[in-house]
Image: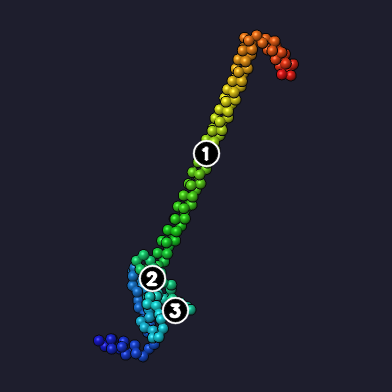
Amino acid sequence: MVSEQTDEGVSSLVDTWLLVRDIESNGERNRGLYIMKSRGMSHSNQVREFTITDKGLSLVDVYLGPDGVLTGSAREAQKLREKTGVALREFAITRKDKEILRRRMMLESKIASLQAEFESTEEELNKIYLEEELKQDIIERNRQEITDIRRGNADTLKSKSKRKNNGTG
């Protein structure tokens, strides 16, 4: 009751009221500071950790972890866990990138092999087509010669044969 009356009496006398508290968690005690009231100006409602150094008071940046605001060694441990997580993710990404590159190279090799096989088959088929055309031409010429022979055009056949042998026909 006396404390509340004192708080009310002091509150009306000051423009800014800072509250310093010990924050106990994870088996350690850290110092916390927050602004109870600050007349006429906007202010943060966050509890801030501070340290006392040779250079005076130093406010530590607020660090929000998965379970809320972390202070002291809990903050440092969380930072290390996050740094480890980042390193592991980067390693996994690098490993996956290498696997993708390896698979890409294997796939390109298979594609090149299939392409070469296709070209070989295509070339073989083209040779067969050319041979067939040549055979058809020879058969057609032979048929024409036989037809000429049967019709009695032996003279025509002999003259063609002579021209072929001389290189003029």
Q: Residues under labels 1 and 3: Cα distance?
A: 68 Å
The quadrant in which the N terminus is found is: bottom left
Q: Nearer the viewer, mark 2 or mark 1?
A: 1
Res. 98 visible in picture:
yes
The image quarter in which residue 131 lies: top right
Q: Which residue is mark 1?
A: 111
Numbered circle sitting on residue 71:
2
Whichever of labels 2 and 3 marks the residue nearer the N terminus, that label is 3
Left or right relative to 50: residue 132: right
Residue occupying the point 60% across, 18% down: 140
Q: Residue furthest left?
A: 1
Left or right relative to 159: residue 94: left
Classify mark 2: residues with Cα within 10 Å, few (<14), some (14-19) or many (20+). Answer: many
- As rendered, which of 157 and 29 lies closer to the eye? 157
Residue 160, position in %: x, y?
A: 70, 15
Classify mark 3: residues with Cα within 10 Å, few (<14), some (14-19) or many (20+). Answer: few
Image height check: is 94 above or below 36? above
Q: Mark 1 belongs to which amino acid? A: Ile
Numbered circle sitting on residue 57:
3
Image height check: is 136 above or below 46? above
Residue 130, position in %: x, y?
A: 60, 25
Residue occupying the point 45% across, 77% down: 58
Residue 18, position in %: x, y?
A: 38, 82
Helix, strand or loop for disc 2? loop
Q: Mark 3 belongs to which amino acid? A: Leu
The image quarter in which residue 60 lies: bottom left
Residue occupying the point 65% across, 9% down: 152
Residue 138, position in %: x, y?
A: 62, 18
Whichever of labels 1 and 3 marks the residue nearer the N terminus, that label is 3
Helix, strand or loop for disc 3? strand
Left or right relative to 92: residue 144: right
Mark 2–mark 3 CB contact (< 8 Å): no
